[in-house]
Amino acid sequence: MTSEMLKGHLDAILLAVLGAEALHGYAIIEAIRTRSGGHFDLPEGTVYPALHRLEQAGLLASHWVQPDSGRKRRVYQLTDRGRGSLVERRDGWSRFAEGVERLLGAPA
Amino acid sequence: MNIADYLDELDRALAFDPGLSRRVRPEIESHLREAAEVAGEAVAIRRFGAPSDIARAYAEAGLPARLRRAWFIAVLLLGVTFVLMRLRTLWLDLPVAADPLTLIDRGGLVAALACVLLAWARLRRLPSPPTRVAPLLHVALGLLALSVGASLLRAAEAVPSGGAAPLPLMAASAVAELALVVLLLGELGRADRYRRRAAA
């Protein structure tokens, strides 16, 4: 997938990753890489502005966590609005993917 | 370039919003240090991207919210200006006349309302390029400033013959209106800085 295509779906990808658990930025990038089977290797700096935008839109909330041993990190989690948005985006994606699959998936 | 130098360069690239820069720096530093433990500083920095690109991405991400905030303040100013225009008419028993100040006062308000409504219609279409929203809000600000100025001049002219006009209330309302004008001016200035950085 090209970076432009990925950019168009970045918000949905971030919401989906955070739908499973609250994570900090570095772990979010690792989760995207791992869960996509290595297909999505984002320029890491592009994730933080997107997280900031989603937080401003009320879809994410964040707070700092300081483990007993380890680095202080800002952890992001979905808000109720974010969960609703994730459900809508999943539905939209399913319909879109089904339509594209019908067009491109098998020869006529 | 090491991580400290990178963060300093990022600070400079984010100079369009010092508050954002203060918020972002510790988070990105934490990320880079963690990445550097795995891959080394140079690789961590390269994978993160150029500071100018990061700053542009933040500006693009934050611009719609800035414009929405400016729009909200414009609506608030519009409402306050309208209510105070009516109240001053009552307080000072102002005649309904077609003098220039009255025309500027009312005409400015109506034209500003049209700009704000049009800006709302365009804001709803975001994240399409927001370049057509900010000029509308600037025009609305100019019109509202004219309306507020004309309204205050009308009131100042009428105060000597205004009888029992509640002067402290009138002064407080004038301060509130002018404060909202300044607030909107500041918010539009911030939005413009975001817009320029996003387009850089």
Image: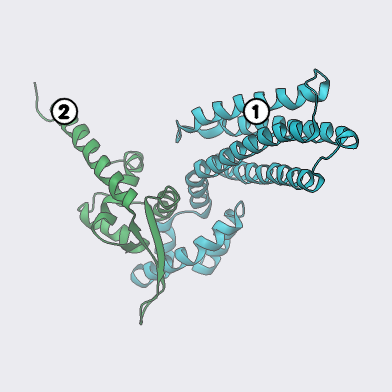
State left or right for residue B21 relative to residue A40: right
State left or right for residue A66 relative to residue B96: left
Alpha carbon of mark 2 to alpha carbon of mark 1: how far?
A: 50 Å
Q: Is residue B39 above or below residue A35?
A: below
Report in which chain the residue with disc 2 lies. Answer: A
Q: Position of residue B111 (x, y in %)?
A: 66, 24
Query: What residue type is disc 2 on?
Result: Leu
Q: Colour of chain A?
A: green
Q: Is residue A28 visible?
A: yes
On the image, numbered disc 2 is attached to which residue?
Answer: A104
Quick one: SS at disc 2? Answer: helix
Rate crowding at label 1 as few (under 14), some (14 to 19) or many (20 or more) other CA atoms within 10 Å.
many
Q: Position of residue B41 (x, y in %)?
A: 43, 68
Report in which chain the residue with disc 1 lies. Answer: B
Toward which corner of the image does residue A104 lie, by quadrant? top left
Q: Is residue A61 above or below residue B197?
A: below
On the image, numbered disc 1 is attached to which residue?
Answer: B112
Q: Nearer the viewer, residue B26 or B138?
A: B138
The residue depicted at 59 percent of the width and 36 percent of the height is B75
Q: Position of residue B21 (x, y in %)?
A: 55, 59
Q: Is residue B200 visible?
A: no
Query: What residue type is disc 1 on?
Result: Ala
The residue depicted at 31 percent of the width and 59 percent of the height is A28
Q: Nearer the viewer, residue B4 or A101?
A: A101
Q: Nearer the viewer, residue B172 or A45?
A: B172
Q: Colour of chain B?
A: cyan
Toward which corner of the image does residue A106 lie, by quadrant? top left
Label 2 vs label 1, nearer the camera: 1
Q: Position of residue B99 (x, y in %)?
A: 83, 20
